[in-house]
Image: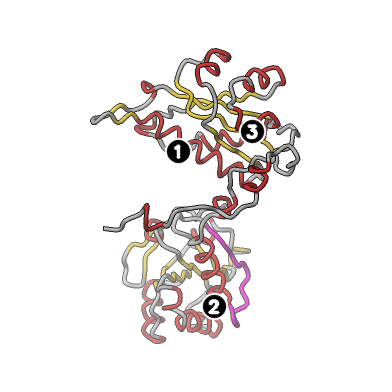
Amino acid sequence: MKKLVEFSLTDDNDRSFTNQNLLGDYWVMYFYPKAGTSGCTMEAQQFNELFDEFDGHIVAVSPDSTQVLASFRKKYGLKFILLSDPKQELAEKLGIVKDGKLIRSTFIIDPWGRIRKEWIGVRIDGHAQEVLEAYRKIKEEDFSINPSILQRRAFRGLRTDPVEDEKLLKLFEAAHLAPSCANKQPWRFLVVRTKENLEKLHEALSGGNYWMKYAPAITIVYTKDELDCQLSDDRKYAWFDTGLAVGFLLIQATQMGLVAHPVAGYDPIKVKESFGIDGSIVTLIAIGKWGKFDQLSEKHLEAENSPRNRVPLSQVVQLV
């Protein structure tokens, strides 16, 4: 996703305004060629009418001087921020200048400074309303629960099809981006995927995890206390931080259409001995594609498509 470039411009009150002023909220930034012309006036008036609908987060940029912009604001009662880009440097960086002329354009920018939608070569009539609809849709999607979190379940109906190494590595790339105390990154992953090694690992599984024997890959997740912060009141962060990494992995797997199911039912001593692991086993994660169910017990088959079971949010969260 493209990010808005760094910039520093001046508004119609001769105050500095930079890209950092846009961080933390959703903004509309639109570019127009010349204040006071009929088309630019119409566009400004249409955005002005919807100012509150955009939460007051509109920035308009043109090559005009700050004095011209101040007159433009006063004449038409404009509520939003007007910025001067006299040399069209910001417009050039955004690729909206052709043959020295500014191309009328609009961008929706999210709280992280990412450009979420753009219109290059705008037709004015109805444009502000179109931008508002897109602005609302982006916010609605962002304020919803991540679809991969909603989709993720403890699925067991795994197919035996192998998962390509590049896809497996993408999961661990995501996991490795997890936060950790003092950035110590204590997580360690051993990805078991050959027939011989999988069979060794199967011997350590509990009876209830029979379904994992169909997984084409099982990851051994382990860590050691000394790999991470050890703080007062016996706060050993290695397990907490490794759990965060596993959470990232699960969401990435779901996004990629893969099952990643962590379990606690195994013999950790046997796992460590079989694979020469120096540390504590946090979990085993079965990884594979979904869609084969004839190997499942009646209980697990029923659970595969059962409704989510969560205690009420009020039981686990307090706002004080």
Residue ID for mark 1? 244
Tag on residue 168? 3
SS class of the residue under badge 3?
A: helix
Q: Amino acid at mark 3?
A: Leu
- Residue extent of the magenta highlight: 115-129
Give the residue displayed 64% in from the left and 43% down from the top: 299
Mark 2 or mark 1, earlier in chain: 2
Instruction: Count neighbours of disc 3 (C-alpha within 10 A) and say few if under 14, some if 14 to 19, many if 20 or more.
Output: some
Q: Position of residue 10 (x, y in %)?
A: 37, 65
Instruction: Count neighbours of disc 1 (C-alpha within 10 A) and say few if under 14, some if 14 to 19, many if 20 or more.
Output: some
Q: Amino acid at mark 1?
A: Leu
Mark 3 or mark 2, earlier in chain: 2
Residue 138 is drawn in which quadrant? bottom right
Q: Position of residue 69 (x, y in %)?
A: 40, 76
Q: Is residue 117 magenta?
A: yes
Q: Position of residue 45 (x, y in %)?
A: 48, 84
Which of 203/76 is in front?
203
Q: Which residue is situated farthest in the left direction here?
A: 232
Residue ID for mark 2? 128
